[in-house]
Image (tube, rainbow, N blue to C red):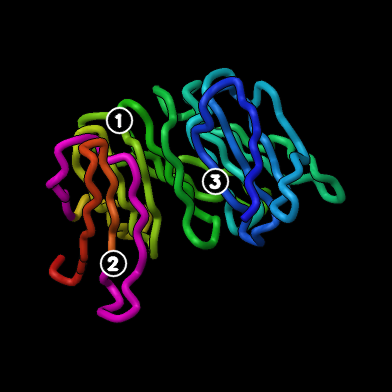
Amino acid sequence: MKCTWVHRVDAVSCLAVSTDESLLYSVSWDRTLKVWRTSDFKCLESVANAHEDAINSVLASADGNVYTGSADRRIKMWRKLQGSNNHKPVNLLETHSSGVNALAVNSYGSLLCSGSSDGAIFVWEKEDESGKMVAMVSLQGHSQSILCLSFVSGIVFSGSADKTIRIWVSAGKNYSCMAVLQGHQGPVKCLPAVVNHYGPSDSFSVYSGSLDCSIKVWHISLSPF
């Protein structure tokens, strides 16, 4: 077991691993984005003031892009420079009217979900080969902050400070809330979801962690809808 201690001047808010598992991305409320090599945990890059406010979320997409979401209400898309360890911002997404808390991307990297403190969720679509993302639809239903998101097989799962989980199903470019899961007594803070390979193709297992100190496991089948 190898343990590496790294000092940050504020809380580390989120981590993400590149799809080839060679890089680790960390973001902090100190507004920095750091890139680490997983083979030896060397810091390859540190971007100071990557955002204008605390960075709440980071994710690495299968298409090679990296996304950061911040309390400054913006999402930045970063791309690794060819032949270099450095990353540069290549797109700025500015539709949210409050801080961005959570991000999720589909398996192809063509769709991005973002959730903010005002309860809004945006679904972004890759517009063309340049990789530019445009807001496709806004999902409204939660009454408080979005704290976590998962995007699995075209289904969006959202967890909120309103203590509920919502399941959003797409029909073309439109999304409808097909279920609201209630049971937690506190905000839902984390929400991984996976396809069930042992059951119907439209069934999922959802794991929710809450500030009520509990973890719940949900088995979801969309066939009745």
Nearest the viewer among 108 and 60 is: 60
Q: Which mark is residue 218?
A: none
Say left or right for 148 vs 37. Answer: left
**Residue 195 forms part of the magenta stretch:** yes
N-terminal of the pair, mark 2 or mark 3, is 3
Q: Secondary structure at mark 1?
A: loop
**Residue 42 forms part of the magenta stretch:** no
User: At which x and y percent is residue 45?
Assistant: 76, 36
Measured Cα–Cα span from mark 2 to mark 1: 24 Å
N-terminal of the pair, mark 2 or mark 1, is 1
Would you name the residue on which mark 1 appears?
145
Which residue is found at the position 60% from the left and 20% from the top?
9
Q: Quadrant of the N terminus?
A: bottom right
Which residue is found at the position 59% from the left and 23% from the top?
31
Measured Cα–Cα span from mark 1 to mark 3: 19 Å
Q: Residue furthest front?
A: 1
Is residue 48 shown above or below 202?
above
N-terminal of the pair, mark 1 or mark 3, is 3
User: At which x and y percent is residue 202?
Assistant: 27, 72
Which residue is found at the position 48% from the left and 31% from the top?
56
Q: Amino acid at mark 1?
A: Ser
Nearest the viewer among 25 and 43 is: 43
Would you name the residue on which mark 2 appears?
204
Would you name the residue on which mark 3 appears?
59
Cβ atoms at labels 2 and 1 below 8 Å apart: no
Q: Amino acid at mark 3?
A: Leu
Measured Cα–Cα span from mark 2 to mark 3: 22 Å
Q: Amino acid at mark 2?
A: Phe
